[in-house]
Image (tube, coloured by chain):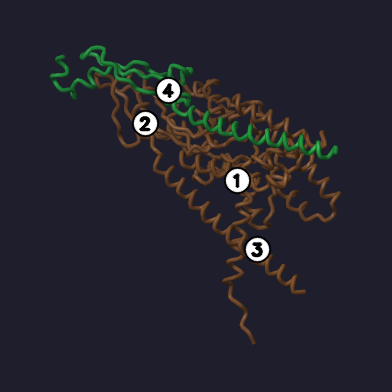
Chain colours: A green, B brown
Amino acid sequence: METKTSSKVKSFVLLIFVISSVFLVIGIWAEGLTDQEPAVPGHIRPTLVWSSPQAPELTLTTNPDSSDQRLGTPTPTVDLTNLLTEDLPADLLDE
Amino acid sequence: MEKDGLASSGNVNRLILRKQRERLGIVLTVLIVAAAWIIGYFREDSDVLESAMVVLPGASQIDQKNALFIGKTAEDEIVGYAAVGEATGYGGPIKVIVGVDLNGGILGVEIIENRETPGFFRLVDSTGFVDQFIAKRFDSTLAINVDIDGISGATLSAEGIAASIRQAVRIIASDGLESPLPAEKRQIKFGIPEIILIGLYTAGYFSHKQKNVKLKSRFRWITLTTGMVVLGFIYTAPLTISQVIALLSGYWPDWHNNLYWYLLIGGILFVTTVDAKNPYCAWFCPFGAFQETLAAISGAKHFRPRPWRKYLTWLPRILAMTAIVLGLALRQPGVAGYEPFATLFDLRGTAIEWGLLVVTILASLFLYRPFCNFICPIDPFVDFISAVRRLGKDAWIQWKPKPAQK
């Protein structure tokens, strides 16, 4: 009788353990995969901001939800005027 | 008599069927793993140009000359040089770009690619590890424990970053600053963990063969306790599926600094291939030892109900296979690992990893080594090597030249 009860308890513990572990393992994978883009240091998303045609700016941003992952001494805003104006079509510059 | 013959013939048929299934399983596994490997191979890419500007503040344009990035102002004045360096960390290659000014001072360091476990790689950021390199001169040692502090809990990642920074700096020194650095002296790292590991493999190998059950059990407790204390709590260096995936991906770390990695994986492959025995799990796996200690305290015994046996055998195999396919296809060994080893031994992990550890500890009070028996991916990996060994042995017996009949 005691053995049967013990066996039932163990079966219950085993079932709970296996089910919860599988869900937790899937959770660990999901967490790792979703973490990839914004939270890994070095993944910086450059955005070209056309504040004015004469002074376009390249803004380097990270995901606003995560802490700033930039390393070293980043330059958040880079003046690209001289770099880009040569390649831009004249009509776009006129606008 | 006739019944015995029928029973014997039935057993032979079952054995043949089992062997055929095993062969099919091996072929399918190899095909799936190969497909994942190929997918992962074509996914590898990185864009470094974006990061060159970040490590060269003041530069408004970047010119590229072979492996060297030259940062220039709008007036075409050179502000500094940048180059990419690459070295292997815990999960695979770590790629960095380093910017150096004209006087040889490091201006910026940017990690542009890594395959480490995200939870642990965050330590790199939170400890400000990379900031230590800023303003250092290009001809400094730039080595951990010399002029750079390491990261406790992410040693291999830190070693990988430092090595890749040194590589980038060497390129800048020779191609940009025209002051080539002398060849780097690489010392072989061989210390207590390596010695203990060799000792544990040797003890496990010979204790296997011990006929005296009591003595064998005592030996096993000694190796288990040593594994748990030294490889677990002191060095946090158990075997993980991430290391297996890194091995399959070809992300082999520099052996001078990572002899332990080679001994750990090489040892398990060697002993399993030669002796068809798992030298690790039952003998000195730190996490297994921890669960076994809990079982010894609570009196938990083996439990595997017959109706569930098949499913419980296949569960860790499926989890191991999923981890390997995920890790290979994404080329992210660190992401695929799910064992809560470091959570226990280093007290670091995400909420979910802590959840898995707590569930395992509670279950260990009722069941004997629940994580090892039903979830852990290492045992299925070792089983697979054993199955391949059996297949090879059978093929050899079938094909080996037969002695000529007189």
Mark 4 or 1 closer to N-term?
A: 4
Which residue: 84% across, 51% down? B213
Q: Is residue B44 left or right of residue B66?
A: right
Type of the residue with mark 1: Arg
**Between marks 2 and 3, how big is the CA–CA gap?**
56 Å
Marks 3 and 4 in Cβ contact (< 8 Å): no
Name the residue nearer the viewer: B189 or B326. B326
Circles 2 and 4 on the same chain? yes
* x and y, in percent, of residue B214 in the image: 86, 49
Circles 2 and 3 on the same chain? yes
**Between marks 1 and 3, how big is the CA–CA gap?**
21 Å
- Residue at numbered disc 3: B15
Name the residue nearer the viewer: B331 or B195. B331
- Residue at numbered disc 1: B317
Marks 1 and 2 in Cβ contact (< 8 Å): no
Q: Where is residue A73, by image quadrant?
A: top left
- Which numbered circle lies on residue B48? 2
